[in-house]
Structure formats: C-alpha cells, structure tokens
Image: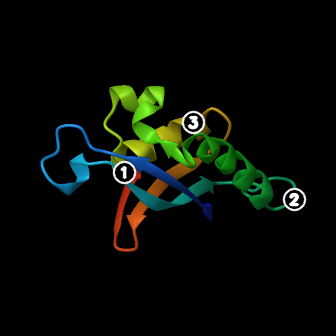
Amino acid sequence: MFTIKVKGEFSGAHNLRGYEGKCERLHGHNWKIELELSAAKLDRLGMVMDFKEVKKKLAGVLEELDHAYLNEIPYFKKHNPTSENMARFIYEGLAREIKGIKKVIVWETDSSSASYFR
C-alpha cells in the first residue's frame, strides 16, 4: 500500500452552538488541514496521485471555508462547526473527486486535531 499526504490551511471564524464556555462566543482559528490518500497500485507515472492535482482539489474545498463565518455555510447550519465536523465536510467534499482518501485531519491549534475517515 502506498500513501501520500498534502497539507492546506484556511482562516475562519465560528462559534459552537450549545457549548458552555469561551467557544460559544464568536472566535477564529487558523486551521491546518492534512489530506492523506492511499492506493494499492501506482498510476502509469508511478504516483498515487499528482501532488499538484491533490493540492488544487483541496484548495477548492478550503476556498469555501477561508475567511468565512463558518456557521453561515449551509452544512454548518445543520452541523455544529467543530473540528470533527469540518474534517467530515472536507472529506465528503473531496470524496466526489478523489479516489483513495484515507483520512482528513483538521488541526485547530498546534496541539489539538480531529480526523475523519471511512
């Protein structure tokens, strides 16, 4: 099995509905995103997928989140904009275009992350 990983980032604001504490108030983060892909076989060039293409597709999904008030995005009107739900949102947004997604990791801070995989 082969794996590759690319990283992306975005800045955005949110507040957690139903949370008691500081995170219930509007605040922002500079999220770091890791996308990991896997494949049993490499393509004709010897790649899982071209890094450039993976980064382009990840940037497309992150564009919707960057410098946004996340609570106003339709998905996050139904799902609390936690790092866990962001990982699922990014995974599902990419799964339509990329095969072999192994995992999406969302880093809210340098020491706190959440991941989603199927």
Nearer the observer, 5 or 77: 77
Q: Secondary structure at mark 3?
A: helix
Q: In the drawing, does residue 46 fall left or right of residue 17?
A: right
Nearer the observer, 74 or 104: 74
Nearer the observer, 2 or 99: 99
Q: Earlier in the sequence, mark 1 or mark 2?
A: 2
Distance, label 3 to label 2, CA atoms, is: 26 Å
Residue identified by numbered label 1: 83
Residue at the farthest right position: 45
Distance, label 1 to label 2, CA atoms, is: 35 Å
Nearer the observer, 76 or 51: 76
Question: Looking at the rendering, which quadrant does residue 40 occupy?
Answer: bottom right
Mark whose residue sits in front, 1 or 2:
1
Q: Residue at x 71, y 55 (%)?
A: 55
Answer whether labels 1 and 3 touch (C-beta < 8 Å). Answer: no
Q: How many marks?
A: 3
* Crowding near the residue tagged with mark 1, few <14, some 14–19, many ≥20 C-alpha atoms within 10 Å: some
Per the rendering, the mark at residue 93 is 3
User: Residue 8 at what x, y percent from top left?
Assistant: 61, 60
Q: Earlier in the sequence, mark 1 or mark 3?
A: 1
- For the N terminus, the image quarter is bottom right
Residue identified by numbered label 2: 45
Q: The residue under label 3 is which amino acid type?
A: Gly
Answer above or below: position of 13 versus 52: above
Q: Secondary structure at mark 2?
A: loop
Residue at the farthest left position: 20
Q: Residue at x 40, y 33 (%)?
A: 76
Question: Looking at the rendering, which quadrant does residue 16 occupy?
Answer: top left
Colour convention: rainbow
